[in-house]
Image (cartoon, rainbow, N blue to C red):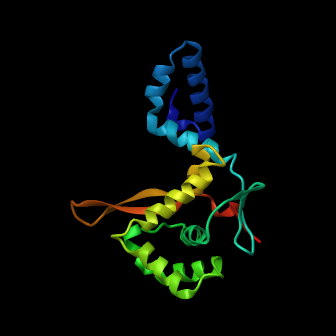
């Protein structure tokens, strides 16, 4: 069958038919080999998208997924809001470029703290030699993992993303960004 003349929908139907044939024959090993682990992982993540619940953020900066509150301290909320505001991602080594924005967010989420303490905490967070940002992201990750499975949580947490660059020469380099991959249409602000 000439696959180049098929529509995408027809190709999907044919792929489904072939996959069922391999499964019926007990040859899931060949199916796995044909699809590849990377494709299967992508498919698992895509399947998880359908079950994602909106992230609701209240006026007083409480975070809810469904009816469950995500228990975070004000500093964690500020970090999360910073990454939520940057769907393109932020490199940890470039956090100092976002110092003012992070400070403003922390002041909004921690109204009872004095400005001096907020500035001191933000200084630790944006210092590339300090581990504070990793600790905060780990705490955010654990808060979401306590509420949902790992694949679903992968959309809500701050995670790594590598962006490939070709610098007009034979050199190839990767930009290591941290992002929240939750589709922004699922973020509901009250």
Looking at the image, residue 47 lies above or below residue 15: below
Residue 158 seen: no
**Foreground residue among 127 and 65:** 127
**Foreground residue among 13 and 180:** 180
Q: Quadrant of residue 107?
A: bottom right
Please tell me which residue is depicted at 43% across the width and 79% down the height of the picture: 123
Looking at the image, residue 78 lies above or below residue 180: below
Q: Left or right: 163 with respect to 104?
A: left
**Foreground residue among 17 and 142:** 142
Please tell me which residue is depicted at 71% across the width and 67% down the height of the picture: 62
Please tell me which residue is depicted at 51% across the width and 36% down the height of the picture: 40
- As drawn, the residue found furthest toward the bottom would be 115
Q: Position of residue 178 (x, y in %)?
A: 46, 62
Q: Position of residue 54 (x, y in %)?
A: 72, 58
Q: Left or right: 173 with respect to 52?
A: left
Q: Position of residue 96 (x, y in %)?
A: 41, 78
Q: Quadrant of residue 38?
A: top left
Quadrant in which the C terminus appears: bottom right
Q: Quadrant of residue 71?
A: bottom right
- As drawn, the residue found furthest toward the top would be 25
């Amino acid at each position: 069958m000439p696959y180049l003349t098929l529509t995408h929908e027809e190709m999907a139907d044919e792929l489904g038919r072939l996959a069922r044939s391999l499964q019926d024959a007990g040859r899931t090993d060949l199916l796995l080999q044909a699809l590849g682990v990377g494709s299967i992982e992508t498919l698992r993540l895509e399947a998880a998208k359908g079950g994602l619940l909106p992230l609701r953020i209240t006026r007083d900066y409480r975070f809810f997924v469904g009816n469950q509150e995500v228990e975070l301290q004000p500093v964690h909320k500020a970090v999360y809001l910073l990454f939520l505001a940057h769907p393109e991602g932020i490199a940890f080594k470039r956090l100092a470029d976002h110092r003012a924005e992070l400070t403003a967010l922390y002041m909004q989420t921690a109204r009872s703290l004095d400005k001096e303490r907020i500035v001191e905490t933000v200084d630790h967070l944006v210092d590339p030699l300090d581990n504070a940002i990793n600790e905060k992201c780990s705490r955010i990750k654990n808060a979401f993992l306590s509420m949902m499975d790992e694949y679903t949580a992968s959309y809500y947490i701050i995670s790594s993303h590598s962006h490939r660059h070709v610098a007009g020469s034979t050199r190839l380099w990767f930009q290591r960004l941290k992002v929240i991959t939750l589709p922004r249409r699922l973020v509901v602000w009250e």
